[in-house]
Image (cartoon, rainbow, N blue to C red):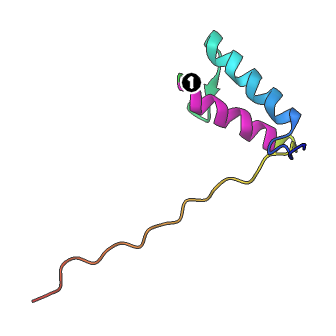
């Protein structure tokens, strides 16, 4: 039984391209333009490019902000 693909083919191509760029040392990140060394960061860049181009990519998981704990009870 065939299962649904979570990511589209276009998304995997973008990630593959980003990984090749990272290997060759030409992948740069964001505004600062620093060289990307991390494998995870390369994948994230590839997925965000795929998202922008309209490929089938699940939405980002938004991090829920933790409410700040109040300091110890006042005496």
Magenta highlight range = 38-51
Q: Depth check: 58 or 65 in front?
A: 58
Image quarter where the N terminus lies is top right
Quarter of image, res 28? top right
**Residue displayed at 18% across by 79% down:** 72
- Vertical side of 23 occupied by 19: above or below: below
Question: Residue 68 placed where, x, y %?
Answer: 36, 72
In the orientation shown, which residue stands out farthest toward the top? Answer: 24
Q: Depth check: 27 or 57 in front?
A: 57
Secondary structure under the numbered disc 1 in the rendered image: loop
Image quarter where the C terminus lies is bottom left
- Vertical side of 13 occupied by 21: above or below: above
Left or right, residue 17 beside residue 71: right
Quarter of image, res 66? bottom left
Question: Residue 56 placed where, x, y %?
Answer: 85, 45
**Residue displayed at 86% across by 45% down:** 3
| Residue 12 within the segment the image draws in magenta | no
Q: How many marks?
A: 1
| Residue 39 within the segment the image draws in magenta | yes
Question: Residue 11 placed where, x, y %?
Answer: 81, 35
- Vertical side of 68 occupied by 19: above or below: above
Within 10 Å of disc 1 (Cα), the crowding (few <14, some 14-19, many 20+) is: many
Q: In this figure, which residue is indicated by the disc labeled 1?
A: 36
Quarter of image, res 61? bottom right
Question: Residue 13 placed where, x, y %?
Answer: 82, 27
In the orientation shown, which residue stands out farthest toward the bottom? Answer: 75
């Amino acid at each position: 039984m065939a299962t649904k693909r979570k990511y589209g083919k276009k998304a995997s191509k973008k990630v593959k391209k980003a990984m090749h760029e990272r290997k060759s040392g030409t992948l740069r990140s964001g505004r600062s333009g620093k060289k990307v060394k991390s494998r995870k960061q390369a994948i994230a860049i590839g997925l965000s490019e795929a998202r922008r181009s309209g490929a089938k990519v699940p939405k980002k998981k938004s991090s829920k902000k933790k409410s700040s704990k109040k300091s110890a009870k006042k005496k």
